[in-house]
Image (tube, rainbow, N blue to C red):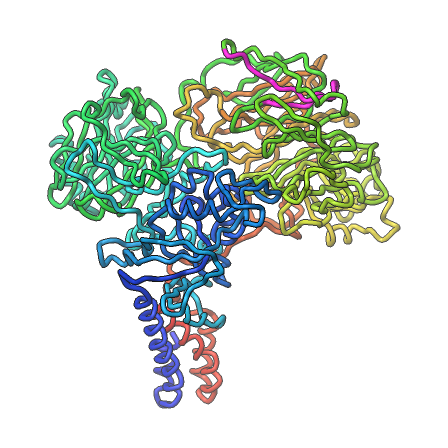
Amino acid sequence: LCYSTISDRLSSFQMNSYFIHLPGYFFLLLAAYLQSAAVDAIAVGDNVCMTGYIMDIYCIELGVLLDNPQITTLEEPENHSFHCLFDESVCYNSGFVMLGEKDSKTSLHCLGPRLEESDVVIAAGRAAGSGEKSTTHITCRSCTGDASKPVSGYRTTVRGTVKDLGDESSGVSGQPVLTNIELLDIEVGCGEEDGIVVRNMGGECKILPSGTSPPSSATPSLVSSIAPSERITQQVHPTTMPSDEFTLSSTPSSSKVPSELLGPSSSSSEYNAASVSTQPSLFLTSNEPSEPSTISTPSDEPNVSNSPTHLPTSSSNPSISKVLSESLGPSLSPSESITQSLSTQSGTSSPGCTIQFCEKTLSDEYVLRYMVNVEDNTITMEAIYDGVAWVAIAFSKDENMPGSDAVIGSPELGDMPQKYRLMGKTPVVDSAIEIMPNEEQTLINATIEVKDGQTVMKFTKLLKEPGQIEISMGLNNMLWAYGSSNTLSYHARRSPFTLYLSSSDVAIDSASPSFESSIAPSSASSQIECKPWPDAAWLQPDFCSNRFVDGLSRPRGLHIDHTSDEILLVERGASRVVRLVPYEDDPNNVAVVALSNTEGLGLNHGIELSGGYLYASSTTKVYRWHYNDGNVGQTEEVIVGMRSGGHFTRTLAFNADGRWLYVSIGSLSNADSDSSRSRIRRFDMSTWDGIIPFNYDDDGELFADGLRNEVGLAFDIHGDLWGVENGADNLQREDLGGDIHNDNPSEELNRFREDQAGQSWGYPYCWSEYCLPQESGGSGIKGANTQWAWSSFLNTGYTDEWCRENTNESVMSMPAHSAPLGMTFYKWKDLSQDDTCEGGFPISMNNYAFIAFHGSWNRSPPTGYKVVFVPMDSDGNPTHQPIDLFRHAGDGAKWPNPGIRPVDVQFDNCGRLYITEDKTGSVIQVRYHGNYLDSFEPSETDVADGALCKTPEQSTSSTKDDITTLPTQSNVPAPTFEVSNESSATEPSSSPTPELTELLRNLDHNPTSNSRQLVVCWPVHLMLLLFQIL
């Protein structure tokens, strides 16, 4: 704008024009020089040396450290344990990359060269890491170093020869590859002649000679215009990472190719890495960006694609359309063949994918057609790629490479595709994709051909074959890939996807599961009748409750381990921990096994399992025992000095990596004189010597203050700790209506972000409103969640205004006196291949909060005595008030004798919900009888026994489009990210800003102010030129 408009208006002032242009020319030359320096820094055959951290590709692609999911991989490699690098096959099988310097703007390390010989890295790393017991990280079992060696952050000096630049000069695009590598101590360092560094230059990571000076902090960077979340995506999921090459011998039965043909190795692990399958692949070419994993919401009608606008049609891709037209026959035009939906209106039945082909768009240039023959137990597939290259379709258990089976075709290898077995790479076997033996080559009518510039692979495959991945009716995990040429070498693109197959007349087509959309309609099984237990129970449609076990002595805290499905709970009445073990021959019958050494210690509520230890709490102490498959070791005291009296629960919670133990203690009375007891403290278990116990007040870090009785604690999928607070009783304030205790103070749903550590939530000085009647005469009625001062503190300086300015609001106000005691978050998993799992909650409930309300004792009418859920959006923010899931079906909240009083809630590995309740001494299991891919819609959403005066309102401003009717924390808002236009990261906006518009107006009316305007426009012009250059 400054260039085209202001320069024209200043044409009579040539000197001004020079002032504008000369700096731009200077930066043009500087950028060209830097670009040349980056390209010329290394060449194939150069012997180079680099110092830095070594990181496994798995954790780079995961985005966070596998052994510490709270840490972004490229942000803190120093915290990545040697255990994860060299004990976990999912990590060391994926290969290794050197990390460059950390960029001050993004706080992320650049990606450096990839190291070809993984076995050299593994051998050197295991020798460099400590094998002694670590108090800060998980001990590395395979490391042989003594206690003086590091336990995390593998930093070393690497020498090697440049094998490939990754600049497409050899047909490969990606990170440079070093071969013939040698790993030395970090102290050795590199010389000036062969040393290289990887540094962010102008928003892009460049390989430079080690003597190159770092860029000035004032140098503009494209990264600065990208939202934080986008920066991480660009750094963590680069599109320039190649995979290992492979060769194919002339003997098919012995030919092997490396696992990176279809992406990095990945396998099951003791850690939760469910998010990996939804991430774009690390191994992509720079000019072929990752295809986003989108969700198509299928209708009841099969069609070629649920997103027809993305499918190549006769208008968008004539070549593919021609191939499809010939495949489908003359009855339909190419466009109709691809986009026509098969009508089910007027009662007509829709033929699905069992009698004709359905299509699924895998990318803009890749289409999959498929048809299931139920009688023959086969599936016919056609992979159509808009180009000439090898193509592959793989069948997987979990969307990961290891253990998958693939059909790969290349016209260069003949006219028949073949079946391959995909296995994880090990330090011994460098390549682990091998062709299946002749007796397993059972494809029918298999062909591969190039037709009109398209590669078309066709085959018919048995759904079930011995020793191979079974293709089932339901959700199937798969992968697709294609190469850059006919020669089997690096893949050009690949991605996981899911395919839903139905033996009925309705075909369902779905992309990779996402937590933001549901991807399948309700199944017929949702109509199954259910007789719940207890008889008086009401549940949402398609949910059913049954008594899992009874006869327990006041069961309280519950823990279910998601790796082993161990079900452990605290019996308050017996002061012990018990294990619930279903009988193998009759899973409906459960054995209750008391754990030795846990009795007689006063255990009453808190329980956790972390790092091979069982933890439980009494009123005054936290204990632990070494735990292995139901066997417990000797009793150890972990925390002592917790004050007795008052609220007796001491809830325990570990963060994801097991480093921090959080302990919550409630108040001594209804309204204490201060908050010194009512808080959450956390303890760094990595610093504990295992001998002298922590003292609660002296050694615990204050994490959250002013919490009257935060009993339920749970972490969400974003790593934030949440809690549910029990508000005070007998509240009165004359200026707000006198006795207002029936609906106030609210029970609170709180979120404790890391940046709020040590802050106060108000108790005992302040309380949160749930519902105050307008007719009470109070002049300052604000609505639910508003902070008010407790009446006894009004004369001591704690006013309403003080409470609102100095304490955090809760995320949500819940009905007063409901007594929330337990909470958990539902973490949906794809269990379509697990025949042992049934009854899991639907995907649409992923990351919903589930809360157990124990029930009121001083409210009329009573409230609580139920389990509710709080819907959450993809960022982890509530979108609705609590919705009843399980409650009394009759009049009133209270159940008939003997009654039900829920305490804690947890999900098992199959996605079923378990509820402890201490009135009848039972554990209740809640199952979902619909399709676990359902988009569940509750039949009732009102709070059945909520406020008597009015519906709670927002206490903070909101727009008319707000979904939720309850406020989030107003003084500590949830993090937000700037979202810029798609083009903003690469080019300036074409629309003038108001400031520049005003500038032009001033130039029109005041030409004498040219020199002043130049001061404004000169930097703008310079920035535009620099953006163009970069």
- Asked whether the viewer can see residue 345, the reply is no
Range of residues picked out in magenta: 567-584
Percent of width and height locating residue 459 = 18, 29
For residue 335, above or below residue 342: below
Tell me: 22 left or right of 248.
Answer: right
Main SS class of the magenta portion in the image? strand
Rendering coords of residue 990 (x, y %): 37, 67
Q: In this view, does 20 lie above or below 155?
A: below
| Residue 771 x, y percent position in the rendering | 72, 38
Q: In this view, does 39 lie above or below 926?
A: below
Which residue: 43% across, 66% down?
Answer: 221
State the quadrant of the N terminus.
bottom left
Residue at the image position 40 percent from the left and 70 percent from the top: 192
Closer to the camera, 131 or 390?
Answer: 131
Please say whether residue 721 is visible from this viewpoint.
yes
Q: In the depicted view, which residue is nearer to us: 750 or 604?
A: 604
662 magenta-colored: no
